[in-house]
Amino acid sequence: MALRDGELEGSADDVELGLSVRVVHDGAIGFAGSVELSPAAAAACATQAIEIARLTRQAGSGGVELADEPAYGEVHWEGPYRRDPTSVPLAERVALLGEWSRGLLAADVVDHVTASLHTVAEEKYLATTTGTVALQRRVRIHPTLEALAVAPDGSFETMRTLAPPTARGYEYLEGEGWDFPGELAELPEHLAAKLAAPSVEPGRYDLVIDPTNLWLTIHESIGHATELDRALGYEAAYAGTSFATFDQLNTLVYGSPLMQVSGDRTAEYGLATIGWDDEGVAAQRFDLVRDGLLVGYQLDRRIAAEARLGRSNGCAFACSPLMIPIQRMANVSLAPAGAPGPSTEELISGVERGIYVVGDKSWSIDMQRHNFQFTGQRFYRIEHGRLAGQVKDVAYQSRTTDFWGAMNGVGGTDTYLLAGAMNCGKGQPGQIAPVSHGCPSARFANISVLNARRESGR
């Protein structure tokens, strides 16, 4: 649902229901789905899937194997939520976001407020011929509020809440996991400071990046780059391949020795967390980068077998009963330094001249996940180890291995945040998938900073 200036602008409810059958027949994959839920429809899908496998085999796409996976029998998994957010009455949701919106509008600096709430409940039943029958249910929720301020000269700035999407119930909006009243109370002050802030001078700066921003850099430069189907060239026609090619496994220096990155389908409240994936593979945690070295990839059963890597690590997902499961991202996260480890303030104290980056905004990355540019919600000058007020129009730019190689400080567990996105896109036909990325605050030396306003020609 969406609100503008505290009033409901639109609301949509969608229910998608269906079944599908996937087969491996004579070394080729076949798939068919139906919106009709009946034994006859399922049998028809199986017949059609076999016929499609025969056709794809003739097209030269045979030789498919699936990595072995044990049978788990009849199993059940449900995400950790107390109140299904999709069952909350519309009036209750509108009342809460309307109240929050009007609170922002009461501030002198705020001219307009937009608010949105996206909620999902997902229930899947999976049966495999190897003997796994899994029923699973999970929910996810993402509230967003954005305030806009217009200056006397007609220029404007926006400021959005930093609360990430999460696999929690409606209790998330009621204070479990995020302090919404506290964040909203501070937002007008941050927006006013941004409106009055000077434009950044381009150059090279040390950056301290908050997890509310760094999660997206992880998603684009590590998460997608370590999908093995992409690294083997299977996404070339749509969303690109990866510079982290398979021949570089265990040899590619991805970043500094401080860099420890895992894929995790078990992380609490993770958007990609599940009990078993859509091929019946049990959820796992696995290493992708260890001590700065590429040591693993994200796998489904087909890619694991093709690459001779043994068991899949459970990364098959379909966003619809009418879509074939494809290899999708786990919760890919950068490990903190430890407990308690450095605070964000301690990371900042080690910077003579730099910028502290908070919140995500726009991004751009090339088709091999190598060259990128990211902006954010707000930026603070760092001078002699202290914050010295906001600047604006900041975009940081680098190459993936240069950027992660420049990481010279990692925050402790108290700086760690699990953020993410509800709508990661991949595949043809396109599918979206929810995925979380945890990370601490981190410090990077001598990173190129552009003035985004000047670059845009405004």
Image: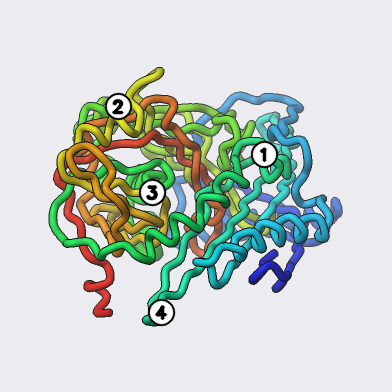
In space, the residues marked 3 and 4 are separated at their CA atoms by 26 Å
Q: Considering the numbered disc 3 on the image, is that residue within a helix, a strand or a loop?
A: strand
Placement of the N terminus among the 4 image quadrants: bottom right
Q: Earlier in the sequence, mark 3 or mark 4?
A: 4
353 relative to 105, above or below: above
Q: Considering the numbered disc 2 on the image, is that residue within a helix, a strand or a loop?
A: strand
Please provide percent x and percent y for residue 307.
36, 37
Q: Nearer the viewer, residue 128 or 84?
A: 84
Please provide percent x and percent y for residue 263.
44, 34
58 relative to 222 in the view: left or right: right
Q: Residue at x 64, y 31 (%)?
A: 275
Q: Residue at x 22, y 40 (%)?
A: 444
Identify residue for label 3: 358
Q: Considering the numbered disc 4 on the image, is that residue within a helix, a strand or a loop?
A: loop
Check whether the beta carbons of the residues at disc 2 and disc 4 lie within 8 A of each other: no
Classed neighbour count for the residue bearing mark 1: other residues with Cα under 10 Å, few (<14), some (14–19), many (≥20) = few
Identify residue for label 1: 175
Identify residue for label 2: 290
Classed neighbour count for the residue bearing mark 3: other residues with Cα under 10 Å, few (<14), some (14–19), many (≥20) = many
Q: Residue furthest front?
A: 108
Which three-letter amino acid code belongs to the residue tagged 3? Val
Check whether the beta carbons of the residues at disc 1 and disc 3 lie within 8 A of each other: no
Q: Residue at x 28, y 55 (%)?
A: 368
Q: Which mark is residue 204?
A: none
Q: Which mark is residue 152?
A: 4
Quadrant of residue 33 in the image?
bottom right
Please provide percent x and percent y for residue 183.
55, 47
